[in-house]
């Protein structure tokens, strides 16, 4: 993604045509910020407050705020699993300061 942006900037500075930036059959540009998240059913954009992992899914009762269609439980499960996997393991080099999660480790 960054390499493609860098190449496009170099082509702009050198004066090459914009059509030369993408070779034929190249996939479309990938961007994490655009397009924004949307309902899988009605494609209504999801606001920032509705896009808080786990909490917004529970508050909205697993339904789209716009059309009311159910949103798969897969989304909060993936978020929960990702959060769990991102936790430091016991004995890791992560500091155990006063706000650490020692209380949740067995035998602590």
Image: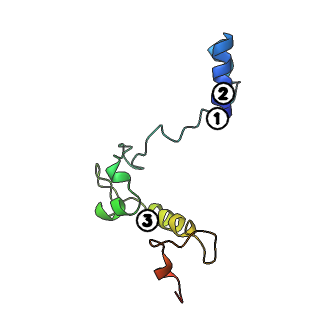
Label 3 residue SS: loop
Q: In the rendered structure, find residue 2 and report the number of the disc placed on it.
A: 1
Q: CA distance from mark 2 to mark 3?
A: 39 Å
Q: Quadrant of residue 3?
A: top right
Q: CA distance from mark 3 to mark 1?
A: 33 Å
**Looking at the picture, how far across and down is residue 103, in whole percent?**
46, 81
Quarter containing the N terminus: top right
Foreground of the two, 99 or 12: 99
86 left or right, relative to 4: left
- The vertical placement of 31 against 63, above or below, is above
Q: CA distance from mark 1 to mark 2?
A: 6 Å
**Looking at the picture, how far across and down is residue 76, in whole percent?**
44, 64
Q: Residue at x 35, y 63 (%)?
A: 55
Lower position in the chain sequence, tag 3 or tag 1: 1
- The vertical placement of 65 against 61, above or below, is above
Kindly give the residue lying farthest to the front in the view shown.
Answer: 98
Q: Residues within 10 Å of mark 3 (few under 14, many from 20)?
A: few
- The vertical placement of 2 against 41, above or below, is above
Foreground of the two, 93 or 43: 93
Front label number (2 vs 3): 2
Q: Find out whether the residues at labels 1 and 2 contact each other: C-beta distance under 8 Å.
A: yes
Q: Label 2, on which residue?
A: 6
Label 1 residue SS: helix
Q: Residues within 10 Å of mark 2 (few under 14, many from 20)?
A: few
Front label number (3 vs 1): 1
Q: Residue at x 52, y 82 (%)?
A: 105
Lower position in the chain sequence, tag 2 or tag 3: 2
Q: Residues within 10 Å of mark 1 (few under 14, many from 20)?
A: few
Q: In the rendered structure, find residue 73 and report the number of the disc placed on it.
A: 3
Q: Quadrant of residue 71?
A: bottom left
- The vertical placement of 2 against 20, above or below, is below
């Amino acid at each position: 993604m960054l390499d493609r942006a860098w190449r496009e900037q170099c082509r702009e500075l050198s004066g090459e045509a914009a059509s030369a930036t993408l070779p034929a059959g190249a996939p479309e540009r990938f961007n994490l910020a655009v397009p924004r998240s949307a309902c899988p059913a009605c494609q209504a954009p999801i606001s920032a407050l509705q896009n808080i992992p786990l909490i917004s899914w529970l508050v909205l009762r697993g339904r789209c705020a716009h059309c009311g269609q159910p949103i798969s439980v897969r989304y909060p499960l993936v978020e929960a699993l990702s959060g769990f996997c991102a936790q430091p393991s016991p004995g890791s080099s992560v500091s155990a300061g006063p706000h650490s999660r020692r209380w949740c480790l067995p035998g602590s």
